[in-house]
Image (cartoon, rainbow, N blue to C red):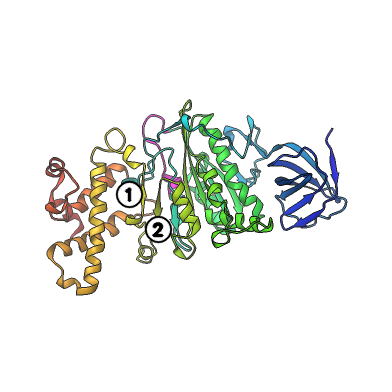
Amino acid sequence: MSVQYLGLSDINGPLVALEGVKGAAYDEIAEIRLEDGSTRIGRVVELCGDKVILQVFEGTSGIALNNTRTVFSGKPLEIPLAPEMLGRVFNGAGKPIDGLGAVFPEKMGDVNGRALNPVARQYPRNYIHTGISSIDALMTLIRGQKLPIFSGSGLSHNKLAVQIVKQAKLTGENGGDFAIVFAAMGVQNDVAEYFRRSFVESGAIERVCMFLNLSSDPIIERLLTPLCALTAAEYLAFEKNMHILVIMTDMTSYAEALREFSSSKGEIPGRKGYPGYLYSNFASLYERAGVVEGSSGSVTQIPILTMPNDDITHPIPDLTAYITEGQIVFDRELDRKGIYPGVSVLLSLSRLMKDGIGEGYTRADHAAVSNQLFAAYAKVQDARSLASVIGEEELSKTDRAYMRFGELFEEHFLNQGFDENRTIDETLDLGWDLLCSLPKNELDRIDEKLLDEKYDPARAERFGE
């Protein structure tokens, strides 16, 4: 027989307090029954003796201190899990919003997940093909990796997220065991509709499980969205042996919801007003990626965040960079030039790509092409800086060659159509074509044997003068 607690002692923002509660546990779910017969769901977020603080998912508007009855469930928040989640759309709390009815669960999953034994983790290898040259060649996405996208307000990160969902695939025999879990937090209605419509029109929705939290939804639901998404991803990956790519946008909205929630609890703020546990909170989400012993599946994450004022030292990108294995950074100047995707090559990297490319994975010359493109583009920036001081006409012949290489690289390699899906061979061949526009003696990151085999100045003629 369940015990009902009558009345509340305090209401503050999304939080309510009860006194005289016995046996409650942290993260336990409670049902709050209002006087009009409606119910709301709350989660225990703080315990102090017999006093319990509940976080109300639907908000506290309309809740009275008197005649409100609270019943504790004795278990944490769980969502129904089944393979049929693919192709479905849920809200941030894991409830279907696509009009197709409830999910018939194969099991119920605790959204908080379970800690992975570090010894059971396997080193991520093999890559996920995105069809986007800048990512596939220079900052390759490896299965089981956490590779965030650092963007800015108004840049085309949403467009890139849709393109990745449309084009991402595995190579090899298990290419069919690939699916995407997409979580959007705090997005406007038109953005949410853009995501949904794009996935439906491209046919990708059949292999996508969507969790949508709108900007008009309660902030508490925003905090649940990545938890629900990652719970679904772990189930599909480690129990159904699928390779799951989780895309979460926008982690800045999530962090701001966490800041608001922390403030309502009266906690002492840290940097920029964010709670001191922002790092550990991010880590609890990002570390739910990887490859685990005993399962042939994997969870790969692409968290997307917008840097406030394009500040890469802001706490959100700063802490994210500490936890994850690289980053893809958007460049506003490239975006102004009309280059899509406007990825800042020199600020971006994938720390795990060295072990998931090359012979048997992508192509034997992948590492050499990638290293040389990075080195050449770095010299482009030096040549541009020099030209801004002394004028382009005063540059040496070599510096002018780098200036031309930079223009060609941005126009033909970085710039790519939204519907253009390049194979890894097309991407690397394009890289060679661009490198052949430089003098042979400048290609010092490629061994002589490979250079003699591939270098041909005629390859660069396709770009004209």
Circle 2: element type: loop
On screen, residue 202 versus residue 23, left or right, reads: left
- The local crowd at label 1, few if under 14, some if 14 to 19, many if 20 or more residues have their Cα within 10 Å, is many
Q: Position of residue 243 (x, y in %)?
A: 46, 35
The image shows residue 219, relative to residue 101, as above or below, that is below
- For the view shown, which residue lies furthest in the bottom direction? 390
Residue type at mark 2? Phe
What mark, if any, has residue 133 been given in the picture?
1
- For the view shown, which residue lies furthest in the front direction? 49
- The local crowd at label 2, few if under 14, some if 14 to 19, many if 20 or more residues have their Cα within 10 Å, is many
Residue on which the image places disc 2: 330
Q: What's the residue at 38%, 29% (across, down)?
A: 173
| 167 inside magenta stretch | yes
Question: Magenta stretch?
Answer: 164-175
Q: Nearer the viewer, residue 37 or 266?
A: 266
Q: Position of residue 130 (x, y in %)?
A: 39, 45
Residue type at mark 1? Ser
Circle 1: element type: helix
| 24 inside magenta stretch | no
Q: Position of residue 420 (x, y in %)?
A: 36, 50
On screen, residue 15 versus residue 255, left or right, reads: right
